[in-house]
Image (tube, grey):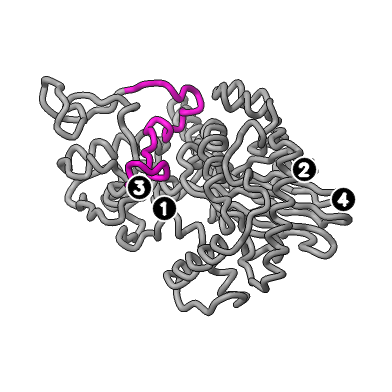
Amino acid sequence: MSQSQNPKFQSLPLGTMSQDASVDRRKRTQAPISGNADGNRNGNGYANGVVEDDELRLRLRPNENHKPESYADLQLDFSPLLFSSLEQYLPFNMLNLSRELKLQYMRHILLRYSPEGERTREECTACNFDYQERTVLVLETTLLKSFYAWTTTRTIYHVSSFQDFVQRHREYKKMIMLNYPPLHKELYTMDAAKFFVPSFLKAINDNTEESFRSIMTESSPGVYTFEMLQPHFCELLLSEVDNFERWVHETKFRIMRPNTMNNYGAVLDDFGLETMLDKLMEDFICPISGVFFPEVGGSTLDSHHGFVVEYGMDRDVELGFHVDDSEVTLNVCLGEQFGGGDLFFRGVRCDKHVHSGTQSEEIFDYSHVPGRAVLHRGRHRHGARATTSGQRVNLLLWCRSSVFRELKKYKKEFSSWCGECQREKKERQRIAVGATKLELFKRLQKSTS
């Protein structure tokens, strides 16, 4: 199958990148593309005059084989290195266009995506960043935390590099896929009518902000809860995980745990559920997160890390205070009978402020209910209190946006979503207003005297 035929490589509507996408995702605006005055389309399928947003699309995956052009000789609103980096996400039929057309296309994206005030060349060029060393493949970044877990605990392989780990992980997954016998094959293909409760399915089918809000409770700013999974699906998934762990024990196959924090649980992607979880993210989570979390790439989610975690007196008992390696996190309790284990939230923070204090309005505790989902930003600080009885199993889907992560590297403050950045910005504004008032007062006194 070619990349153009593979759904994993389908392009992404440009309109979903805008911060106002939640208001009207079908709004059609016009992006300037220079060309002949007659407005005819060129051989690449793009109008020489004006192109509508619905026609402008970025790819979900970068084209690593494309050598981007240099924009260092131009005076731009953003860092020239950012344009070189973003060029790898352009549609294939745009890669051979002139530098001017590609620049206009990318600049239109950046101007829509970046808040006013962050478009300074000085801030961007201050980032000493080599685009050729900027990142690994999107699919490989999904494995970074697992790499650290393996090299720290030394449970499976001795690996000398991340690239070595990626290769060994491919072999590891292949070994499981060839040998593990699935118990419930119906789980491995998305069947929405059997997986989700009717209210959730109706909201997704209606696909409007109003329909999403009708099923959701914003229990605390940025923390949304809603009924999602049918009891039968929860039972099947629990049974499948039990079957996998039993197979692991019987075959003495040592498995990779979900992350560095959990000693129990399993990575669902590793034993065949990756395609189903991709469908879950793209068709069901992305529409919602595009409405509620556009400022952290909620509309551009393109990879995931799916796993289950297990808590109990003979499992992981609690989970410390942390942030997730995701833009958006879906957390659904599958069961079973348990006591305790509440989630506690303490505000959204960027990397710079992750250890800053908590404001009273940011404190929120949530009690798990089987089948009920919690959706929040990955940078929303949280943890899990001790499970005092029984056993609790949760499905986690860490959803990531490679486009957001690329753009984030060129920003210094994140007042659109970081609570501490917002407070610092307000304080700067307060000081500025105070200074202006004082200056006006002095001038008034001088004029009257």
**Mark toward the start of the polypeptide (4 vs 1):** 4
Q: Secondary structure at mark 2?
A: strand
Crowd tier of the residue under label 3, counting other residues whose Cα lies within 10 Å: few below 14, some 14–19, many 20 or above:
few
Q: Which residue is mark 2?
A: 366
* Of residues 431 and 118, the one drawn nearer to the viewer in this rendering: 118
Left or right for 95, reference 223: left
Q: Which mark is residue 409?
A: 1
User: Identity of the amino acid at label 2?
Assistant: Tyr
Q: Residue 349 location, x and y as percent?
A: 59, 49
Q: Secondary structure at mark 4?
A: strand
Would you identify the image quadrant in which residue 328 lies? top right
Q: Which mark is residue 339?
A: 4
Q: Secondary structure at mark 3?
A: loop
Left or right for 221, reference 18: right
Which residue corresponds to the image point at 57% horizontal and 59% vertical from the top-left?
270
Residue range (magenta): 1-29
**Mark toward the start of the polypeptide (3 vs 1):** 3
Give yes or no for residue 3 being in the magenta stretch.
yes
Which residue corresponds to the image point at 71% horizontal and 70% vertical from the top-left?
250
Q: Which residue is mark 3?
A: 1
User: Identity of the amino acid at label 4?
Assistant: Gly
User: Identity of the amino acid at label 1?
Assistant: Lys
**Mark toward the start of the polypeptide (2 vs 3):** 3
**In the rendered image of this protein, does residue 254 appear above or below residue 270?**
below
